[in-house]
Image (spheres, rainbow, N blue to C red):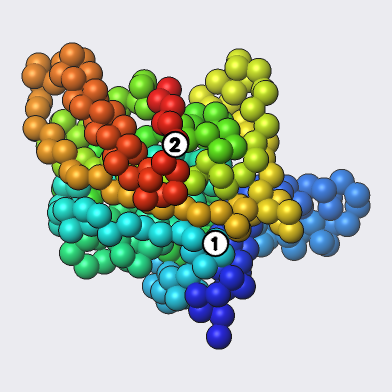
Amino acid sequence: MLYSTFLGGFIIHIVTVGPWLLGAFFALSPLFFFYIGHLVAGSILLGLVSLQYILPVREWPAFAAWMKKMNPRAYYKKCTLAPHNLKDIRSEKSLLCYHPHGVLCVGFSWNGAHSPEIGSGSGPLKIVWLIVDVLCDAPMFGVVLKWCGNLQGAGPKNMKRLMEKGSNIGLIPGGFEEATLQRDGVEMVVVKNKKGFVKYALRYGYRVHPVYTFGECDTYWTFPYFPRWLTSALNSWKVPCVLFRGSWLVPIFPRPGIELLTVVGEGIQFPRLEGEALTPQVVAQWHAKYVAALEALFEKHKAEAGKPQAKLTVL
């Protein structure tokens, strides 16, 4: 059996990471074949690429269940969601904010959206996991996301729709900026100027949990020397500017010999504020409380994660 083995975890990475990073090349492949004169091959590939946008793609519960049984965590030396505060997550109006983004969101994925503990998409802790909108319709990867059934776009319209219903939500506040700035072995978050999620939490009175994944910064070696103007421009277009290498066997996959620990912090109950009460000063005040709670979470659990000397860089 492949369940909960390195090979099983490796297969899940092929199914998820492969489409994530290579889907764009698949979408462009018809143009290449047209260019070199292979019209039949180009037409077949174009038809395959187009199917995703013509035919409805529905949730496939059996696929999501299969992913969990295969256990993508088994790919790593250690990948764990700590039990701390999981029972503190309420059945509605809970916002889980994952840090850091990393190159490929390992903590958010395997210890969040696809975790057996809180990523089932059903039951009392049903959580909707939000990612950048463009990925939801990305070639190949968009199909995988729809099959999973519990991932949606993080655009303002959908965010408001979910919060008006009181849905539990998981997201990554640092976004592509955090991915762009990742440094090998440096525990770092980008949150100082990320106040949008705080404003939403105040507007709808959510209970907010800081979540930190130790070891996310060890998943890939990164090239951090792109010009700042280039990274800022690409990030504004929702395109991460990062060059990376992971496993020696398959460089687009994370390093398998690392240890990751994701810890959920205690919930911070935000008041519900509307109109003139929701001022920039109030947002800044609650944002500062959140950042302080995130830093305290890091300090409290860094020894448990095997990094007692680690320092958290907050940008």
* Residue tagged 2: 309
Numbered-mark total: 2
Q: Which residue is mark 1?
A: 77
Q: Is residue 148 above or below residue 270?
A: below
- Residue at screen point 25% across, 55% down: 84
Describe the element under mark 1 as helix, strand or loop: loop
Kind of residue at badge 1: Lys
Which residue: 71% across, 56% down? 250
N-terminal of the pair, mark 2 or mark 1, is: 1
> For numbered disc 2, what is the local secondary structure?
loop
Task: Determine the residue positioned at 28% across, 49% down.
Answer: 264
Q: Is 314 left, or right, of 142 in this rendering?
A: left
Residue 281: image location, x then y, percent: 18, 14
Q: Residue at x 79, y 56 (%)?
A: 42
Q: Residue furthest right?
A: 37
Where residue 282 appears, as percent x and y from the top left, is 15, 18
Residue 213 seen in render: no
